[in-house]
Image (tube, grey):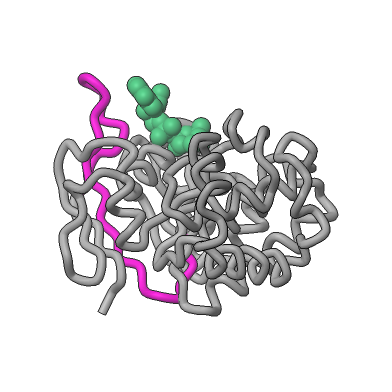
Amino acid sequence: MSLLVARDVVVAYGGVRAVNGVSLDVAAGESLGLIGPNGAGKSSFLAALGGQVRLTAGSIALDGEEVGGLPAYKRARRGITRTFQMTSEFAKMTVFENLVTAGHGAEGASLRNVVRWRRTRAADRAVAARAWSVLDRFEMSHVADLYGAELSGGQRRLVEIMRCLMREPKVLLLDEPMVGVAPHLVDKLVADLRSIRDEGIALIIVEHALEVVQELCERVVVMALGRPIASGTFDEVVAEPEVQAAYVG
Ligand SMILES: Nc1ncnc2c1ncn2[C@@H]1O[C@H](COP(=O)(O)OP(=O)(O)OP(=O)(O)O)[C@@H](O)[C@H]1O
Ligand SMILES: [Mg+2]
């Protein structure tokens, strides 16, 4: 059975249908690439899955249960998480504090949550232990006490992903995870994402860096003007004339 099933998803901003009828299924442990030209509706579709925008029409089911009407924080509890761009709070917290606040179920990083955590930390050894294990796994223990603002682009991306993993997700939504990552670190991030997939988490990755999609995603959906125009392996979709035409514009 598919883990995540989206049917006929529509997202309209005012009169503009940014996502205009997208259906797809994703299985546990699968990485699905979502590509297409600028303005195709990829980010809007991820936001529809994550609950950051309201569905104008359509449905989203996780493990057979409809979640399309739930707010983002409830979907996150069910197991759909997404990475966010660095927030100002992220920058003002240490990496460890970022992970711990995420582990406590805070939707975005927030200083209020850090303060709360500092008060109750003795009771929260399990979350702290998980943070250390995630740091170890991605060889990031040495930056645990650095502030978000002190990290490189690649390290920030990894911390965003690690924050998601603190929630023990089933589905991880990634919007252009390679932006700001130094070229020599792209391979490490690809390997890290592959290991996350291999533990059974479904990845949906929007990415303009097509070589990354080719390497990481066993299946690719191409969107243009709010609709899927092709799906298959990377090699299959890039060979389709309609896909080539959409990229040329
Ligand atoms: N909050 C918003 N309000 C109004 N229109 C929006 C909003 N967000 C996106 N749009 C419009 O919806 C369409 C799809 O945008 P979206 O950001 O989803 O595309 P995308 O495929 O992620 O593009 P890119 O590759 O450039 O990130 C675009 O025409 C965009 O201008
Ligand atoms: Mg986008």
| Predominant secondary structure, magenta span | strand
Q: Looking at the image, which residue is at 59% across and 32% down? A: 89
Q: 43 or 17, which lies in front? A: 43
Q: Quadrant of residue 170 in the image?
A: bottom left
* Residue 172 placement, left or right of 142: left
x, y percentage for residue 60? 22, 56
Identity of the residue furthest to the top in this view: 14
Rendering coords of residue 53 (x, y %): 29, 36
Q: Quadrant of the N terminus?
A: bottom left
Which residue is nearer to you in this view: 147 or 122?
Answer: 122
Q: Answer yes or no: is residue 249 visible.
A: no
Q: Is residue 87 left or right of residue 113?
A: right
Relative to residue 93, is residue 249 drawn left or right? left
Q: Which residues are magenta?
A: 9-32
When the figure is inspected, residue 219 is found, relative to residue 83, above or below; the finding is: below
Which is more toward the observer, 235 or 143? 143
Counting from the top left corner in percent of width and height, residue 169 is at 43, 65
For the point 57% across and 45% down, the residue is 176
Residue 8 vertical position relative to residue 43 in the rendered view, above or below = below
